[in-house]
Amino acid sequence: MISAREYYNQIVRPTVDEFFGNNKDLRLAMLACTVTLHLLDYIGQNGAENAKQGDKKVNGLKKAAQDQFAFKVVEGFALASKHCNVASLPGFDSGQHMVAYPAVCGVARCGGSFLGDTVGGVTVRGGTDRHVNLMGALTETQRYFESEFPELVQ
């Protein structure tokens, strides 16, 4: 299997960057969230003696990441993109998204922009009534992974 660092640099970062370059594209949003979520599988499985031991480590990493709101958004959207609707994650389903307009003068639209969101693009409910821009959630999740697993960027 490829290392977590290779997966991050060859798969995750380019996919996320591609989405950031076209942040209105639902397909790219789903792919970016999915490959980002699976980074924990590569971190947990690399170095494990066997798949069962690796799965235990992955579960622990996912549980720790649950403290990060941005990670929960990325995970929820990734799982919803695969399973259509996730009973364990209320508020996430494959149709619970919108393409928001940046909240800047001359571009913002009533009902289509969110105060403070200056980039717009694919926005999800975040499992709550709060709308979350996926670019922000992915950025925060990458920061978290890079701080927790410095081997990804060294």
Image (tube, rainbow, N blue to C red):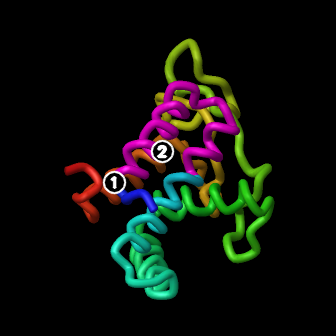
Residue that badge 2 annotates: 11
Residue 118 lies left or right of residue 73; in this view the side is left
- At which x and y percent is residue 15? 51, 39
Query: In the picture, residue 152 is in which quadrant?
Result: bottom left
- At which x and y percent is residue 19? 55, 34
**Most common secondary structure along the magenta stretch:** helix
- The magenta stretch is 6-33
In this rendering, is residue 80 above or below 56? above
Counting every numbered tag in the picture gives: 2
Residue that badge 1 annotates: 5
Q: Are marks 2 and 1 in contact (CB under 8 Å)?
A: no
The amino acid beneath tag 1 is Arg
| SS assignment at label 2 | helix
* Foreground pick, 25 / 47: 47
* Foreground pick, 71 / 132: 71
Query: In the picture, residue 57 is in which quadrant?
Result: bottom left
Residue at image coords 55%, 45%: 32
Q: Is residue 67 visible?
A: no
